Structures are given as C-alpha cells and as structure tokens.
Image: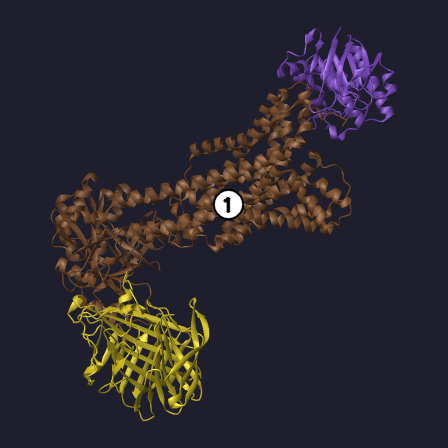
Chain colours: A yellow, B brown, C purple
Amino acid sequence: MNARLLALLLLCLPGFATAQGFAGLGTDAQGFAVPDPAHRLSFPADHGAHPEFRIEWWYLTATLTGEDGRDYGIQWTLFRSALAPYEAEGWASPQLWMAHAALTTPDRHFVAERRARGGIGQAGVSAEPFLAYLDDWEMRATAPGIVALSLSARGQDFSYALTLEAQGPLVLQGDQGYSVKSRDGHASHYYSQPAYDVTGTLTLPDGPVRVTGQGWLDREWSSQPLSGTQSGWDWFSLSFEGGEKMMGFRLRDTAGDFTAATWISPDGSAEALPEGALSVEPLTTSQVAGRGVPTRWRLDLPAKGLSVDVTALNPQAWMTTSFPYWEGPVTITGSHAGKGYLEMTGY
Amino acid sequence: MIAAALGALLSHWRRQPGQFATLVLGLALATALWSAVQAINAEARASYARAAAQLGGDAGLVLKARSGAIPLATYVALRRAGWQVSPVLEGRTRIGQTSLRILGVDGLTYPVMPASETTDATDPAAILLPPGRLFVTPATAEALANAPDLPPRITTPDLPEGVALTDIGTAERLLARTGEITRLLVLPDQPAGLPPLSQLAPDLELSETGQGDVARLTDSFHLNLTAFGLLSFAVGLFIVHGTAGLAFEQRRAMFRTLRALGLPARTLTLLVLGELLALALLSGLLGLVLGYFVAAVLLPDVAATLRGLYGAPVEGGLTLRPAWVASGLGMAVGGALLAGVQGVVKVARMPILAAPGLLAWSGAARRGRWRMALAGPALMLGGVLALWQVGGLLGGFMLLGGLMLGAALLLPPLLAGLLALGGRCATGVTGQWLLADLRAQLPGLTLALMALLLALATNVGVGTMVSSFRLTFTGWLDQRLTSELYIYAESDRQGAALEDWLRPRTEAVLPIRYAEAELAGAPGRIYGIVDHATYRDNWPIIAAAPGGWDRVADSTGVLVNEQLARREGLWPGTTLTLGPGWQAEVVGVYSDYGNPNAQAIVAMPALLAHVPNVPNRQFGIRIAPEKAPTLAAELRAAFDLPETSVVDNAAVKAASLAIFEKTFVVTAALNVLTLGVAGFAILTSLLTLWTMRLPHVAPVWAMGMTRKALARIEILRSLALAGLTALLALPLGLVLAKVLLDVINVTAFGWQLPMYLFPLDWLRLLALALLAGALAAALPATRLRRLPPADLLKVFAHER
Amino acid sequence: MLLDIDKVSRIYPGAERPVLNHVSLRLDACETLALTGESGSGKSTLLHLAGALDHFDAGEIRLDGQAYSPLDDAGRAALRRGPVALVFQQFNLVPSLTVAQNLAFHARLGGRHDPAWTAHLAERLGLGALPDRYPETLSGGQQQRVAIGRAMALRPRLLLADEPTGNLDEATGDAVLDLMLELVAETGAALLLVTHSERIAARLSRRVHLTKGDIR
C-alpha cells in the first residue's frame, strides 16, 4: 500500500500545524528508524507493531454481497503514530492509536472513529498470536500467523462481525516489501494479504444482513513516506473475476505524478511494475462534502492488457473522521471485470 | 389601464409620504417585535442552559467509584467492552503559598480542549510526553511564574482561575497518583448493544453532573417565554390590522373614482391585494432588520450581532437563522393579509356610489358594538370550553387566546358604556363635549385601543408571572438550600471522616442520605433527615397535620412532595407505603419545584432501619455565613477535595439571581417596546382621524374655545382613553397571569406556582400607559395649537 | 353704533390682489344688514373678520368700541362666546351631542346659559319634541334651526350668518329666515347676513353690495 493517512493521529490533536505537503508527511524523520532496502521481512514478528518507526497501519477492506443480493463494502483500519521512537508503560507512552471503521451500501455510508493512548492496554498489536485492537474493535487471529482472522467493529448506528480465511500467500510489495513512494527515494515497508474469503454479518439500522465476499489486508510502516511536493494520492486495490489482482496508486505531485502498480497472478505470485507503467485518469467528478471528488476512473496497464473503468458503488463514501478522506468499494468494467476498493486523499 | 390604475393607487403614497411611512413603520414594528421576542426567547434558552451548566458543572453523566479512586484497569476494561468514556484525574498541589487545582485529562478522548493563546506551543509531543504542559489562564500563569518544578505553562482564556488543565500522564506525576482516575466522563455517543455497567464495573456508580432541578425549573420558564412571544404576536397582529384597515378607509374615495372611471372591480381588488403584499414584504424585511437590532441591543452580548451577520454560528450567540427570517416575513405577510382581507373584501363589494363615509358613528358603530359585545364573551366561553374539552397544553393556549381576543372585542362596548356613564354624570359643558366627542371617535380608535389593551394585559400578566416565578424560586432556594455549605464526599469512609472533622468546627452537620425507592408505583426517593431546627424552620410546607415534624421525628409520619401528593391524592391523614412492611402516615406536603419525581422524607433512623447500606456522602453544614468560605477552603485543603465537592450556597444563590436579573431586564425592555408599539398605533389612528376631526373642532373654535384649550382637550382625551384601557387591562392581565401560572404551568409540569401581586408595578404601568397616550396625542395637539385660523375657516367656507 | 368696520383690508398670502380693499361698514343695534356679492367678492371673509375668526391686514374693527387688533387668541375667543354668535351654511352642529346639548352648548361655553330661555327657544324653533335626537337624524331645516337656537341661546349682541339658507329649499329657507329675524328683533341683536339671494336681501333692513373687495 502507499503513503496512506499517515499523519492522521498527529492532526487529531488541536493546533498541530501542517507545514508542507499533504498531512505534513514531508518532514524529516528525527530519531526514528528509516526504511532499509536491505531489510528482509520476517513473520510472524513483522505482523506486530514497529514502535521505532513513526507511522504504521493495519488496513483491511472487503467487498461484500449480502444474502439480499445487495453490494456492500467495509473498512477496518488501525493506525499507529509515534511521538517518539520507543514504547513506555502507562500514560507516558509516546505511541498514539486511532481506528476507523466504515460500512458502505449503495446509498448509505456509516463511519466511526476511535482514539487511544498506547501503554495502558486500550489499544495495541501483538504479533503471535496476532491481535490488533482498539477499544472493542478487534482483528484477531484464529490460527497461527494471519491466515484466519475474526474482525469486528461497531459505531453508533452500525456494526459488523466477520471471519476471514486467506486463499493465497502474502504479497511483498515493491522490492521484497520495500516500496518506493517518490523519485527522491521516499519509501516504506509494505506487504499485503490480498486474498481473503470473507463471511459474516453486518448490522445496519434496518437489521442484520449475512454477507460473503473478498477481503484485502495491507500492512505498511515508515517514517517519512511522502515527498514535500506531493499533495495527495489515489489508491486502488482491485480483484478481477479471472483471479488476478492489482494494487496501483498515483501520488499527485507538483513535479509530475508518480504511479506504481503490483500485478498479482491467480496463484499469488506478484510482479512489481515499473514507475509510470500504470496510467490513471479521472472521468467523472461528484460533489462530495462540498468538494469535487473523482468517482469514476479509467485505468490502463498496457503491459497486462488492462483497460478498465472503475466506478464507485456509492459516490458519497466520505470518511467524516477527524481527518476526512474518501474510501469506498468500486466495481470494475472493461477488459477485466471485478470489484475493489478506492481511497482518495487530498481533495 | 392597469398601469394607470396602479399609478393612481400609488400616487396616494407619493402625495402622502408620511402616511406611507406610518403604514410601513407600523408593520415593520410589529414584525420587529415578533422577531425580537423570538430571538430573545431562543437566546434565553441558551443562556439558561449555560447557567444550568454553571450551577451543576457540565451537563452529562459521570462515573465515580463508590470508594476511592478508579483503577486505570477499570477504565481500560470499560473501553475494551465498547463504552466510550474519558478519564479525569483531579487533585490539588501546593505551589509555595498557593494551591493549584490540577485537572488531568486524556487529550485524545476528552470532549473539549481549550484553545491556546500561543499557537506554536501546542505540539502534541510536548503536551503528551514528559515534562508535559499546563494550560492555565494568564492570571494563574502569573501566579505560577516562580514555580521551578512545574511543567511549562500555556495560557488560555477558557479555564477558571487557579486551575491547571494538563495531560493525565502529567497530572499523575504532579499529584503522585499513578494509575488513578477520579472520574470517568460518559461521552454522548455510545454504540448500541453495550454490556451493562453494573456487570462490567460494579464498583462504579453513575451520576448526573447537571443540576436537574434547575434545568427543569428553567424549562417551565421557557414555556412561559413562549407564551409571551405568542401574546406579542397578537399585539402585533392588531396593530397591523389597524394600520392596513385605515389605509383602505382613506382611499375609499379614490377607489370609487377608479371604479367610476371604468376599472373593473376584480382588477382593482387584485391591484389592492398586490399592493398589500408588496408593502408587507417591504415592511417585513425592514422589521427583521429592526428586530435583529432590538434583540441584539437587548442582549448583553452585542458582539453576537456581528458573529451572526458574518455567518459564524457561535453557541449562545445571536444567529440569523433561516427559520427566524421565514417566521418574521410570514408574520408580516400573514398579518397584513389577515388584516387587509376585510379591506380587500370591502373594495370588491363596494358600490360605485354610496353615502359619504364620514363617521356615521351612531348607527353603524352602535350595531358593531353590539356584535362585539356578543362575540367577546362567546370567544371567552370558547376558550374555557377548549380547556375543558381539548384540555392539556393546547387547551390552555386556546383558553389564553380566547380570553385575550374576547377581551379585546369587549373593549369597545365597555369603553362606550363607561363614556356614556361619564357623559351622564359630567356637568361642565367642556367635559360633556369631551366625553361625547370621545364616544364619537371610538370607532376610529378601536383597533389601536385593542392593541393597547393587549399590550398592557400582556405586560401585567407576564410581569406578574415572572415576578411570582422569581419570588417563588428564590424562596424555594432559601428554603431548600438552607445550609451554608454542601459537601459531597467521594466515599462513605471519607464521609465519616468529614463528619468527624466538621462536627467541632460547625454549628451543625446535617447528613443528606437517601435511597431510591418505588413510591405509589413510580420511581422516587426516600430521604432520611435528623431532627433539626433547620428543617422545622425553613422547609416549604404547603399542607401539614398538627405536630407533623414530631410525627416525622418519632418515625410514625412521613412528608411527601407536592407532585406525589397531587398525583396520588396523598394529603395529610392518608397513609403511604414506603416499602415492604413499611407504612407511615402522611403528616405534611412540601413544595418541590422542578422535580418531576415522587419524594418522601422520613426520620433518619427509620430510613436506616428499613434500607440497608444507604450511602452517607452528602452533608449540609450550618455555620455563620461569613465563616463559610474559610471553612470551605480549609476543608478542600484538608481532604484534598475537588472544587465541585464543596458548594458554597451563597454562590449558588447569587448565580441563580444573576440569571433572573438578566431576564428581568429583557422582559422589562420588551414590555416597554410593546407599549411603545401600541402607543404608535394610537398616534397613527389619531393622525388618520385628523382630517375628519376638523369639522368637529372648527365650530367649537368658532364658538369661542381657544386653540390652546382644544389642544389641551386633545391630550386629555387621549389620556382618558389610555387610562380607561389600562384600568380594563389590569383584571385581564391578572387573569392572564393566573392562566399562565395555574393552567399552563400545571398542565406542562405538574406543579403550581403561587401568584403574587405587585400593585406598585400596576401604578408604574398605568403611568406608562398614560405616557403612551400623551405622547401619541402630542403631535396632533401641537398641530391643532398651531393651526392657522384660515384652515379652520375652510370648514365653513363655501366659496371655494 | 355696535359694529364699526373701518378701512379694513385683507390680503391672502400669495394672492394677486386683496380680497378686501379698505372696506368700511357700520352696523347699529337692532339693525339687520344683508351683505351681497358675487362668489369671491370677499363677503364671507368680511363676515369672518367681523366674527374675529380671521386677522385683517389693515384698518380696524370695533365692537361696542372694543378694537379687535390688540386682542390675542384668547381675547378673540372670548368675543366669540360673548357678544358675537355665528350661524353657518352647513349648520356645523356638534354631531356627538344631542339637540338639547347642542342648543345649550354655546351659551354654556360662554358661561351665560339660561335654561328657561333655551327651552323657550326650543319651543319657538319647533324643536321641543326632539331634545334627545342627534343632528344627523334631523332634516336640514331642523338642523339649521338648532344652529340658530344655539347662537341665540347666547343672547348675542351681533349675530353673524353665512348663507344660513343656502343648503335649504326655498320654503324651508323662508321659514328659517322668518324665525331668525323674529328672534333677532325680539332680543334686540344686530344681524349681519351674507347671501347671494336678492329675495332674501330684500327682507333685511339694509343691504350692502360687495364687488371685488370693495363696497360700491
């Protein structure tokens, strides 16, 4: 995954000024560890938290179909943001946590947000057995590693409880999990589990709905992933009917956009495509929360014969969190058909 | 044709700019009054909410430990179960000679963080990581300037003096209370389906921070303010009716001419209707602006005006809401239409040729008066029937409407009767002529006088209501909050320690202990009291059996509150079941304003004998009032009690009274304004009658009465009408107050407010009414005095 | 000599020529004088000046030797409720007072109300049966009789009448004039009557014709 909602936690606090770039990500890392291209990811340890890095997240999205035949999408995200590169007991911990949950239907979009301090046990992530939690929201392993998970969250007017079973291997993004984010060399450690089968129950104001579908987990940590001239990003995770998957993003930059993509075969083997191989173009802009946000896109990846339209299931999937952004399920038509998730920031 | 006709219609206004201004101003004033009342009403609600918060801390729920501090683990457990709570650690630390109250919160979950005056100082790492930061007011920062051991300070205006708001981690270190939490705020948005608190944290108890009693009492006040708005609307409507109606009368001749010149009646009617609508919109807009400024001037916070105009919705500030604008314009247009319908219908039906419309006063007016004399009582009766048949709040308001409108209709026949009676008794020729002339003018002044009647009655009614309300409320505060200090302990153990510490230092320590119970099938509370003169001397008893307090003391009697007594008919002599196998005779009923629930008072031994484990954490302290602040400070220091745990009664009373004073200023100003508008209506009526008056006045002048004398009589006549109207308004106002207090209030809240009479206010009001009358007549009188004889001679001239 | 109008002029502001130009006129007690002239000849103005209702610009008017020009508003008013009474073409009764009240009104204003005399007048004027009626319910002739009664109740030294029969038909007018002349003769008052009718002028003891503000 890309440079996502890194500084949300910092922005939650009053008066935190953003000096440059989107969400202030262009600042230098001071005292924090820096992603190392030579580092090789090791599991289960890297499923857990990396407090020596400034930012980190566990980001799960799922496209679902209800027994009522309707399309749904859910998001479950846990962010970690460190004020200093260490962990401590009690309120003195510099680790801050924030979680977002969303449930999208074709005509509704439910959002909830939670925040917590590290060090007191209100939020955290342990690697083995795997558990990521904040308050009563949990992503918990029911088998070694992250092959099988149970997932839950609830807000004032919605909740969900889902089980996830991985159908393929973990995918290391970029170069063996070292994902470059700008031509200046900004980067992060990044791996995904893009092939979960999902079953479970969504609870909406109208009552519970049984659902099944596809889930995608992104794990990423870094200390300085955005360049100072980058203003926001458009990020796609797409699952096609033939079993292929694609992760692609565009970082909008005053010095020229930066795109990258990973093509995942049905067997789970991943191929990182070079910068610029993917082209993305907004087709339709919707008025969302008082601003124009592209909700239909054209994606072309000539190397894989891909030319598709990506359309939001619900254009109004606006995350009214303390740091607002757009995130919701999409449907794919064109050379390939399928479903996926779209995230857009900086609009 | 239409353009020409419209030109003719509008030319009237061009020729008579003063009259145009009068009509527009009249409508605008009515709209302004209505809008201002609405805005102020909304504002009063907001300021009451603020005051209620001030009295009882932030409104909302908090969790406290039954004893001692809340462990951090309990907070985490609640959070992990889904409960949205936010921890607060509160304590005191000594800095040299002064004591600083530390309020530690979790900045990530605390609902309100103060705005800092220095923007660069709010780096989250600085605030959350050691050494942390203290948010204090500039004055507190000054006092702490030489405290080397404290974290750096950040100044903010949003805090009380002597308080440092800081991160809970910093507070832990400063207070040396690691892992402790004083209380948990229960945040407003909780997810559905949470496990019950009693199961998760049985050691915590939920309590309300807001003082419910005060909130409920002010609720009742809002309702009464709403009634005031309604009455102002009625006054405004009458004025609009008056001005619009007179504008029709004045152009009667022109309408006839237009018709005679071939303008169809239908076209004329539409034109007149269109003109009316345009005028209403123009006046309505003007009125909105006026009303906005009236409200802004009346409200203490004038800055609110600017905020509202620039669109920033500030809580408690005066904001220009679309609903407010719509209702103001609606009032102007609706009122003008309602008022003008009569005129428009007259235009539509008017025969081209008719007898001249000069005051055919005796016949037509007399018939109209008879109709009013019949319709007035019918409306009043309708109101009474509505209360009886419809009932409830709606019935109450219908009664109010019926009484006011009925009385307004009854005014002309009553005034005519009084004047006729006076005419019979008058001996002097001038007096006789004055009274006869008054009667002759009555039809033209009817609407203005009705408006004055309603304004005066509203004034008396609302004034009586507000004053009664204040007297009752302050009396109730005095009676119920007799003790000089109220103490809230954190646990039973601390309660016991406090009691021991306090006993030698005070005149009396009165424990306040109660148990939740079911009283006559509804939730309520049973209080236990010790036998003490404080209760016997001050408790607001409204019905008592002989020796009631002795019966309570020997555990055979029980006191109940008014709500329980009224609901269940539990008056002295009846028996109340307090619990299984526990009955007592009701020996007294006390007033308990603002509390919707049942309440009973028994002797402390009886309560303790029947209910196990009654908490012992609240105390009333009797002490010489001047010693109270010192004792409170000592107490806080000795037991490290948070600010809210020791309540100085004088401060509570002062705060409540300050709120009422503010309301009084606003009410009084509104009353004067209402009267002013009614006075304006009289002025416009008198000016309209002016041209018709000359033929009446000229012969009298020709017969040797000086213009000076005539001018004097002009004022005297207006004074007489205003005075008579004021006399008739007094009983109406008292009935109005009675309905507000006894019907509306009882229906809405289940308790009755006693009515107090304020005769001095009536005198003041009579003076105001006379002043309004005199001012209204001043202009016509001055004109009359300075009128050139040639103008008077025109009346006699036939060589023109 | 009761009334002495001595070279009186009246110019209305903005008018081209004076409405009265050095007019002189004398009237003795018991005398009845008809003032005739075309419309705009100034006859009503002269009557108003004689009644102290209006100011003149030059000359002097005296009643029983009392000059008008030094009088202030109050003095002029006192004159009008003492020695001078007026009767108008439009009757100008007080509409809010009854017939009886109207009859007594002027005399009571002047503080010289004599109930017996007023009652006598009511009988003489044929109003005895109508004391409680209001003016608007009366015929024109009846209303003018009330106006004459109201004036005569004052026992004026000078009665000023401005076209008193102008609004009445001929027969009614003649009857009203008869009554007026009778009462004037009976009380010894002088009458100055403005009319444009030759027939009526002929019934008075003297006549003066006014043309364009001048007596010829």
Position in image of residue B775 (x %, y %): 53, 31
Q: Name the residue under label 1.
A: B32
Q: In which quarter of the image is residue C51?
A: top right
Badge 1: residue crowd in 10 Å (few <14, some 14–19, many ≥20)? many
Position in image of residue B478 (x %, y %): 29, 42
Q: Is residue C96 visible?
A: no
Given residues B436 and A10, the one toward you in this image is: A10
| Left or right of residue B796: residue A305 | left
> Relative to residue B205, is residue A2 depicted above or below?
below
> Relative to residue B724, is residue A288 depicted above or below?
below
**Image mark 1: chain:** B
Given residues B370 and B300, the one toward you in this image is: B300
Check disc 1 and report its element: helix, strand or loop: helix
Q: What residue type is labelled 1?
A: Ala
| Left or right of residue B634: residue B431 | right
Q: Residue at x 38, y 51 (%)?
A: B316
Position in image of residue A290 (x %, y %): 43, 66
* Quadrant placement of the C terminus of chain B: top right
**What is the number of callouts on the image?**
1
Given residues C71 and B745, the one toward you in this image is: C71
Q: In which quarter of the image is residue A119?
A: bottom left
Q: Which residue lies furthest to the bottom in this view?
A: A267
> Relative to residue A155, is residue B787 depicted above or below?
above
Q: Residue at x 70, y 6 (%)?
A: C65
| Left or right of residue B747: residue B429 | right
| Left or right of residue B714: residue C11 | right
Q: Can residue B397 be seen in this view?
A: yes
